[in-house]
Amino acid sequence: MTVAAKLKFPYRYDEVGSLLRPAKLKQARADYHAQKITQADLTQVENQEICRIVDKQVALGLKDVTDGEFRRSWWHLDFFAGLNGAEFFEPEHGYNFHGEETRKGGIRFTGKIAYNPDHPFFAGFKYLNSIVPAGITAKQTIPSPSVFFPNKDAEVFDNYYDGDFDTFLDDEIKAYQQTVQHFYDLGCRYLQLDDTSWGMWASFSKQTLRPELVPLAKAAVKAINAIVDNKPDDLTITMHVCKGNYDSTWAGAGAYDPVADYLAQLHIDGYFLEYDDERSGGFEPLKKIADNRRDQRIVIGIVTSKRPQLEKEDFLKARIRDASQYVPLDNLCISPQCGFASTEEGNRLTEDDQWHKLALVIKTAKSVWNVE
């Protein structure tokens, strides 16, 4: 079993998680759903392609690698459906993105939300960790608990708790605590919570959070801190705040100001924040977060995963300098603004474009921070 290298994460150059699904994997998944191949056949293709992209990430020079989320269809729904008490379903409509409606998908609570010791993500991590070479860390990503809050717009429906949110929240926290511990027992030392709630709540607000969203934000702080405070000391937990990433489109736009006070209350070890275009606003809100925890790293996502055009290194360095006015340079890192394929459809760029983007992140960070 591989255990994480003794590096501080997030690293100066890092990645969010998902990678473009290759045609071979997409075909195998389609064949499986058409009952042309077995689950074992699909798993074999998944394993082959995960091996390939792990080798590529290592060759690029990344210190932590993911499985590209190759075993998932959705960045979040697959995880939730794997918990006890929840099931996947297809609603009447997909999610509304900028100029596009997504594929259909949602979650229903059918019973008490609880930890599933046989959650398929555990086998997935176990495989990833078994193929990661010494000195490289296997990074696991899961959706944040706030994404699981009942919400019609998010297609998460409560068919069990009858509106008793407090009981649901207690059950959810316990399920997450046990799930995180199981990942740790399997060797995970770097776990990332992917969270669209903060980005969307900021989008719905102006300078301050809308009053009706405040109870949700407080509940999210409670849940996330209860999970993080329960983790082993040598497990790093970070959070990626996203405003939507589907087929190179987005769902939310707006600065982080309305949620900065709440993000500053979280006990996590680092943030991944989108900063690839004007939708993200300025770096000013980062000061509140940086002032709250002096040892917390903030990863600014200044290379876009939505478009193939490669950014200029001088432009990225200028963005880092701008951010360092609000966060000490020693606490900053860089990455793409999101994954390249939050769903299996993927964004509108090629796999070569994807590797060039990650290589640029690495090259820029090495130049700025003088790291290996």
Image (cartoon, rainbow, N blue to C red):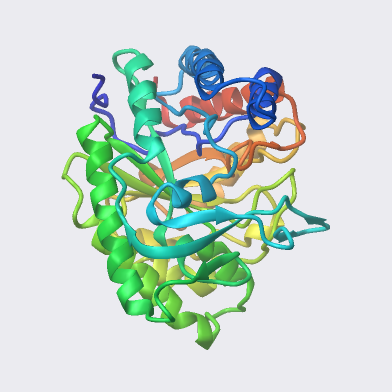
Q: Residue furthest front?
A: 35
Q: Can you see residue 284?
A: no
The structure residue drawn at horizontal position 60% and vertical position 51%, both measured from the top left corner, is 275
Give coordinates of residue 194: x percent, y percent. Answer: 47, 50
Quadrant into which the N terminus falls: top left
When asked about the image quadrant of residue 106, the answer is bottom right
Name above or below for residue 195 compared with residue 359: below
The structure residue drawn at horizontal position 49% and vertical position 30%, both measured from the top left corner, is 365
Q: Nearer the viewer, residue 229 or 105?
A: 105
Name above or below for residue 28 compared with residue 346: above
Q: Residue furthest bottom?
A: 211
When asked about the image quadrant of residue 327, the answer is bottom left
Q: Can you see residue 290?
A: yes
Q: Is residue 123 left or right of residue 348?
A: left
Give coordinates of residue 56: x percent, y percent. Answer: 53, 14
Give coordinates of residue 355: x percent, y percent. Answer: 62, 22
When asked about the image quadrant of residue 337, the answer is top right
Q: Is residue 290 left or right of residue 5?
A: right
Q: Is residue 178 left or right of residue 255?
A: left
Q: Residue furthest right?
A: 99
The structure residue drawn at horizontal position 28% and vertical position 42%, both measured from the top left corner, is 117
Name above or below for residue 245 compared with residue 147: above
Quadrant into which the C terminus falls: top left
Q: Residue furthest left?
A: 233
Give coordinates of residue 15: x percent, y percent. Answer: 50, 34
